[in-house]
Amino acid sequence: MSTDHNRIKVADLEKNQQDKILVTDANGELEFQDIKNIKSENYNALDYTDEGKALDARQGKVLKDLIDTKSEDKSNKTDDIEANKASSVKYTSAKSVVDWFKSFLFPNVSSKTTTLIDTDLILTGDSEDSFKTKTGTFAQLKANLKSYFDTIYQSVLVSGSNIKTVNGTSLLGSGNIATPDMNTTTAQTVSGVKTFLNLMLGLRNAANTFTSFITNAATASRTWTFPDKSGTVAMTSDITSVINAGTTNRIPKYVGSTVVGNSRILDDGSFVGIGVSNAPTKDLTLGNQSTKTLGIEDSDSYTSGRDFSVSAGRTINFQLTSNFIDLNQTSRVYRKGYAAPNGDYFIPSNMTIYKQTGGTGNLIVHATLSYTINSIAISATNDLYVSTTNGLYKQINSTGTFNLEAGVTNRAYYAMSFHPSGHLYAVCACGDTVGSSSEYIYKRINNSGNFISEITSAGRYNDVACAPNGDVYVSFWSVGLLKQTDGSGAWSTVYSTNSLGSVCVLENGTIYACNVYQGIAPKFAISINNGFSFNTSTVDLPFGTSLYCYLSTNKNNVYTYKWSGSSVFFQNNDALGFANLDGGAFKIKSGTGKGTGKSRVEFYTGQKTVSGTDMQVETIRVYLDENGSFVYLTPPSYSNDADADADANLPSKAFYKITGNRTLFQKP
């Protein structure tokens, strides 16, 4: 239609009339008409097919009546799909379709199964038969999966880097992995360290009815070593009568077949008593309850009586042992000691210098300074030089005050040694101002002025010792023993080792050198040919396998001690020792009485009888009384000297009397 006429007058729109409808007239123009006056050509019957026609209410009523009177034709409808599944004209409801599929596909499904067994059916879509639904058993599924994994994945799993193994064997693959029989009746062999939480190791009883536990109350790593023998483990309560039945200082003895108690012997660490009621006051003290006898038991009737000897100590002129003997001194952190020309031995510890007079006896305090001592040295004139954290000090003739040496650079001189020509050598280690691993050898010429450097290359020089012939030896960490011939010129390595700690030279020229750690062989080396060769010592230092020790000498004797603290140990190499030493006095003391009471020393022997088996009679011969009188009770008596000389039973030098004469005579 023409759009030129599709216009509505504004006046028509403003009339506000009801029941009007907008239509086009014969000319195609829009106009409002009463809805009751719709022309018949504008609608048609229900079977009208032209477009643009409207369906009015009258025809709608006809359509509704047709629908209300329409009845369903059910002649081709069925709910039994299974019976009519071959029909192409029958139809059914959606519910019937669902029910039929459920009955066909899952005829016996009432609930899910808990456990699959080999005969259970499993649905699958067969890809080789147009994905038709088919069933298979659970046993078939397992067999197919096993074959699949065996052929496809087994080799990968067996050789994979993330697969657990047993003793190096993969958990997957063919064959058997041998494992120990871990039942309760077969002996087990288990090697290596096995950790049990808190040592909760359970042990079953023989009847396998209960378990006992071993518990662990250790607060650190412990090692328990069991004896190499069979036996029964005892509880502490089982041995209470053994371990708790004694008394402090009492030597135990068996007072029953399984019980330990006190014996008569008491040892308080200083004296030993036998049967004493009070603390013993002698090396061997006997109780005062009765008279005591000390002797050898009787021999049998076929054996002579045994000799009984009591002797005092003697001095010797030979070496008893080459071992280092503990002098039983207080354990301290000692630094290197030094011997004076007169035989006195000095040794520093912290700020105190100790002295052993004449090289014997205990260490006593010589002097205490205000600064920590690094080392000491003593000149030929007996002057004592002390390296401290505040500088080098001097004590004239080893007595009096200590004076600070002027013009001497303050360094931590770890060791010092006087040369026979009067020079003072020193080495620094672990404290030099240039660093703990950059130290040098120093020399104070004629012991005057400042120290000058003998070696300018950095290194750790631990100890220095001057030999009587003028050679100088220095222990050099990681290199060995350096030597400067006659105290001048170049330094050469005469003994190579990688941890040399200390060195000393004896008066006879023997050189001792030891490693810092005895675990490094050789632990302790000796040279008897001025350092041309070294041999491993047959004597070990007394500090075990780990040490940092010092060696120092007093003439030919050697002292050693640990830098971290120990007693002092001594090796006696001067076999002849000192001249004109006394032997120990043998003293026989009688017990002292009171007032006019007796106090005697008596001597007894047996009295001869005729030849045979008769027992001799014990007879007193001589005694010394409380007044000092010598009483000879049984001198033989003769008529004259000739008779005494003729008596073969009277030995030469024996005393005798002549009848009627009070004089004692001596047989030639």
Image (tube, helix red, strand yellow):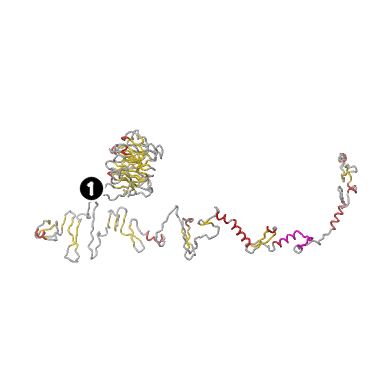
Residue at mark 1: 581
Depth order, front residue of 590/190: 190
Which span of residues is magenta-colored?
A: 84-102
Q: Position of residue 40 (x, y in %)?
A: 90, 49
Q: Quadrant of residue 396?
A: top left
**Seen in the image, is 135 located left or right of residue 256?**
right
x and y percentages locating residue 577 in the rendered image: 25, 47
Relative to residue 342, is residue 34 drawn left or right? Answer: right
Under mark 1, the amino acid is Leu
Residue 583 falls within the magenta-colored stretch:
no
Q: Is residue 273 above or below residue 446?
A: below
The residue lying toward the viewer, choosing from 203 and 94, is 94
Q: Secondary structure at mark 1?
A: loop
Crowding at label 1, few (<14), some or many (≥20) Cα neighbours within 10 Å? few
Across and down, in percent, residue 195 comes to 48, 55
> Residue 563 or 526: which is nearer the viewer?
526
Quarter occupied by the N terminus:
top right
Residue 92 inside the magenta-drawn segment: yes
